[in-house]
Amino acid sequence: MSRWTESKKNRAIEMIKSGIKNNEISKVVYMSESSVSLLKYKSVLEYDERIKCEICGKQFKQITQKHLRNKHNIDLDEYKIKFPSSELSTKNRAGKYKSFKHPNKGKTYSEIYGNKEAEIKRNKISKKQIGRPAPYLAGTGITGTRRDTNTYARSTYEANLDRIFIFENKKYISELSVENERFALIGEDGVFLTYQPDRIDVNGLFEKGAYLEIKGYMYPQDWKKIQLFREQYKDKRLLVISSDEKYCDINYSSLKAKYKNLIPLWEGEKQNYKTRPDLYKIGYQTPEHIKYLNDNYPNHINLGIKDNHYLFIANKCLLFNKTRLGKKPYVEGLKLVAITDRRPTSSRKSSGVYNYELWEIETTDNEKFYVTNQDKTVTFYCYQQNEFFELIKFFNDNCNHSLAHGRK
C-alpha cells in the first residue's frame, strides 16, 4: 500500500459520500480497508458534523458536562433550561447511542449472576464501604458546597440545618467529615449493610452527641436502616429530622417556621442553590463574565502579552496556581520588579543572556504572585505575595533595570 496523500483522501471521501463500499474504495485509492473505514467515521460521518455551544460559540460533536462546568460554570440541566431548543449532540452521534444496547442494562445483580453470586458481590461492595466517608455525589436533593456555610449538603434541608447550627453558634460534624464514621449493619437473612448519619450534634442544639438523619422523603429502605441502627447500636442516639410526622423526632416544618425569617439565605423552592447559584455557589461567575474572560484571556493569558518571555513568566504563575493552589486565575498584567546580573556578595556575573529577575503578576482575582530565578539563572519558580519581602532582599543592593531580561 502507498502513502496516504491529500488527493487520495479527498477522492476517498467523495466515494464514501457516494455510498461506495470500503473494499471498492480501497482498490481505487490503493489504501487498506481499515484506513478507509477509519476515514469514513472520522472525516465523513463525525468530523463534518458539529453543533455549537450557545455560550462560547465553539463547535463540538457533543456538548459535555465537563465543558460546561470547566468553561462556563454551569451543569447540563442549567444549560437545557437556558437553551431549550439547542441540541446537546449531533444527530449521527445521538443515533449511535440510541442504537446501542448493553446486554446488562436495566438488570439486577441477581438477573446477571444468579442469587448466590449476586449476594456475594453485594456483601463485598458493602464491606469495602466500612470506615469510608460518604460518597460525594450520593443523594437526590440539590447538592453542593454552600458558600455561606462552607459545608457540602445533599439537599436544602441539610443546608438549612447547617445554617441553624451556625446561627445558634453550635458545633456540628458533617457527613463528609472523617469524624463521622460509617456503621456496619446486619440486615435480614444476614445481609451485610452500611449506614452513615447525616450530621452529629456536638454541643447539644437538639441533644448532645446525637446522630442526626435529615430526610425530605423517607424511602422504605432508609427507614429500615434507621430501625436496624437503633436495634444494633443501642448506646447511640439517632434523631430523625423530617416534615413527615410519621417518622420524625424533630419536625422540620417547625424549624422552618422558627428560623426561615431569621436566616437570610434560607433555601426553599424558589431560592436555592440551583435557582440562585450566584448566592450559594462558591466561585460562581455569570455566563456573560465567563464569555468576557474566554474572549479576552485565551488559555488564561492576557491578549496583550505577545513577548515569549512574558508568556513564559505568566504561564509559571498559572501552573503554580493550578497545581499548588487549585485555582484557575486569569493574568491581568505583569511587570519586571527587579533585575540584576550578579548575586549579592559575589563578583561573578551572569551570562548576560539570563540575568536574575523578579516579576510581579497580577490576576483577575486581585491577587499578586512573584516569579523569580534567583536560585539559578535558568530556573524560575513562582511565589505568593506574602513572600515578596524575602525575595526582594536578593536584589536590594544590585538592582539594575538597564539590563535585558532573559529570553525563553
Image (spheres, grey):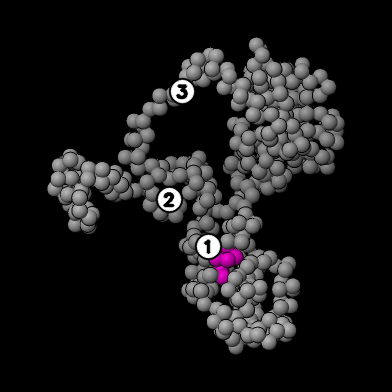
Q: For the residue carrying disc 2, how many other residues have a C-alpha within 10 Å: few (<14), some (14-19), or many (20+)?
A: some
Task: Determine if residue 223 is in view.
Answer: no
Say which residue label 1 marks: 300
Say which residue label 2 marks: 54
What secondary structure do most residues of the magenta stretch adopt?
helix
- The disc label shown at residue 58, or none: none
- What secondary structure is found at the residue carrying circle 2? loop
Task: Determine if residue 379 is in view.
Answer: yes
How far apart are the two marked residues, 2 and 3, measured between alpha carbons?
34 Å
First-in-chain label (2 vs 3): 2
**Magenta highlight range:** 313-318
Q: Does residue 223 appear left or right of residue 51 in this picture?
A: right
Between residues 350 and 194, which one lies in front from this camera angle? 350
First-in-chain label (3 vs 1): 3
- Residue 101: where, in percent of width, then height? 38, 27
Q: Does residue 80 appear left or right of residue 361 in this picture?
A: left
Say which residue label 3 marks: 106
- Residue 248: where, in percent of width, then height? 74, 22
Residue located at (63% from left, 68% from top): 381
Q: For the residue carrying disc 3, how many other residues have a C-alpha within 10 Å: few (<14), some (14-19), or many (20+)?
A: few
Which label lies toward us, 2 or 3?
A: 3
Q: Does residue 297 appear left or right of residue 187 in this picture?
A: left
Q: Amino acid at mark 2?
A: Glu
